[in-house]
Amino acid sequence: MSRDLSVMMLTWEFPPRIIGGISPHVYNLSKSLARNGVKVYVVTCDFPGAPQHETIEGVEVYRVDSYKNPAPDFATWVYLMNVNMQKEAAALARSLGGKIDIFHAHDWLVATAGIGLKHVFREPFLATMHSTEIGRRNGIHFDYERMIHETEAWLTYEAWKVICCSDYMVSHVRWAFGLPPDKLIMISNGVNAEAFAKYENEDLSQFRSKFALPEEKIVLFVGRLVYEKGVHVFVNAAPKVLEKENAKFIIVGNGYMKDQLSSVVKALGLAHKVLFTGFVDDETLRKLQKCADVSVVPSLFEPFGIVALEAMAAKSPVVVSDAGGLPEIVDHDVDGVRTYAGNPESLAWGITRVLADDAYANRLRQNALKKIREKYNWNQIAQQTKSIYEAVLNDYSKSFWAQKGQESPAEKATDKSA
Amino acid sequence: MQVIIFSWEYPPRIIGQLANYVEQLAVQLLKSNEKTWVVTYHDFLTGEYEGTEGVKTVRVTNPVRTHIGVLTWVLTLNQEVERVAANIYYTAGKQIDLIDVHEWHFIPAAVTLKKALDIPYVYSVESLEEHRSHGANSPFNMSIESIERLGTYEAGKVLTKSEWMRDEIIRSHKVPEDRIRVVSPTSASWLKEILETYKNVAEGRAQK
């Protein structure tokens, strides 16, 4: 190719708008692709105070009006937001004069925009499936969920290739939508280990004292407070751990379960031992992860589990459940502890094991750090992604869409009969 | 001229009076030697057809079968309308002069096609959500009104069938009067006026 490969990423979240794991994923992937010579245009939802257009380390970021009018429900808002996103992305792609080689959508939240752009510009289209509705809800029970499930199915149907971040997600997505195996590609998620380096030599005891007493060990949960993340399992494990260890349980994040969880904590008489911080900024989060004596990922459904990687990068020992992609990240007793998903006894056992044995905890930390540096670095992930783009473009160059203005054999036949 | 008409109803799928009106329009355009396609919805008569009068229709269905309301159904269906309109555009040598969008349903598709491929559109208004819902302003009604407003904002021209409707659109959506043209279906020069509007909108694009 004579010029740089250009890709337009569609995502409903991009920093500073952070809702879940898609935001850091697209952020790190885009920056690493840019470093590997790919021109990346990110089109995303707007955020108070964030500029409509900015360049971040070579990545062109465009934030579009994400539909401020009232919408009857979340899914309708998503489809309406896609109208605005598609309109702005189409105008941008046109203004670039056909420079976009690939459209890449992240999850159903940008499905309709991505599908539309594929067809109007006739360029190849890829989708990364970060999660699925059937996984999040543990089945499809209502029309609302079925509609999202069918939108996801349509997205994977329209995509040239479907990227998933773990072997677990590849088989899950293949099962959920009946996709042919050669359509699915596993490219691992990554973690930015350097993000924690600057706190390496910083004295965090002052910071730590805001969250826990010096004699309390910190047990950290980071995630949305929703059922699938298993935060209720974490809360139920707390009294069992406290029988043996003096610890402070810190819960970072927001979600619909928050009120319910805090009343459970009060009923257990543990209001002084469990702290809900709500959503915190990046710096606070990283420092907390550095301070944590153990980081816990008790998910019941987990497509990948990036929060486990972050903890490993922060040199915090991890205790995870055996759900979804987590067992692919953590080798039991080598770089973390695996416990049974949904089982507070098992989780408490894992937490206690790490807290009770410093030598064991240190061994886990060192092995974990080695693993994330070797296996989960963004540069390698960007190179893998770039090679998928190149392979897709090579396939595409043989299709009739690549001969712009040419008709398909079927279209020719129809035209003659007319 | 090469024109694509978007309408959510078209014979044999008749919901109100729009289906027969749009069919008449398409037939008359063909008789005036304007190449015309109709893109519409049907749940199972999908694909490309050439009717008895020579009108080419392409019917699409919704790939998402389960919905929680009209809005999610319409918004997802738009992608299929957009897809077949793009196919017509590429097959017709990228020579589509404009799209005539009847009612709000397929405004999102028309707007993307305008932004992506520089195909202007005329927004033919039959009725407004404000009247249909008797002024209700639930989030559902407001969402539909916002699509109507997007439609009037991005349109090359808004066509109405009465002066009353013109005034209502000006009042409701703050559209400048010169962007609206009233063409009465009962007028003797009905087709001539519509063609004139089409030509102005198509030429307006070329001047940009």
Image (tube, rainbow, N blue to C red):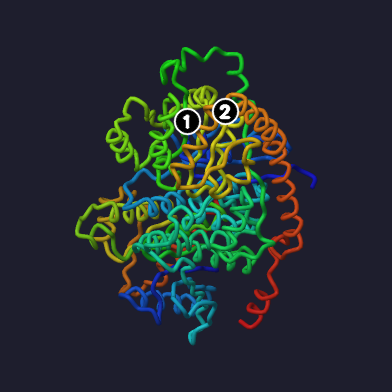
**Quarter of the image containing the C terminus of chain A?**
bottom right
Point 70% across, 74% down: residue = A409
Residue B115 point in image, percent of width and height: 53, 52
Numbered mark located on residue A112 in the image:
none
Viewer-nearest residue: A398 or A266: A266
First reached walking from the N terminus: tag 2 or tag 1: 1
**Furthest-right residue in view?**
A2
Is there a contact, CB below 8 Å, between mark 2 and mark 1? yes
Q: Give the residue pinned by disc 1.
A: A220
Q: Give the residue pinned by disc 2.
A: A316
Point 46% across, 66% down: residue = B64
Residue neighbourhood size for the residue with mark 2, other residues' Cα within 10 Å, grouped as few (<14), some (14–19), many (≥20): many
Q: Is residue A333 above or below residue B48?
A: above
Is residue B24 in view from this perspective? yes
Residue neighbourhood size for the residue with mark 1, other residues' Cα within 10 Å, grouped as few (<14), some (14–19), many (≥20): many
Number of marks present in the image shown: 2
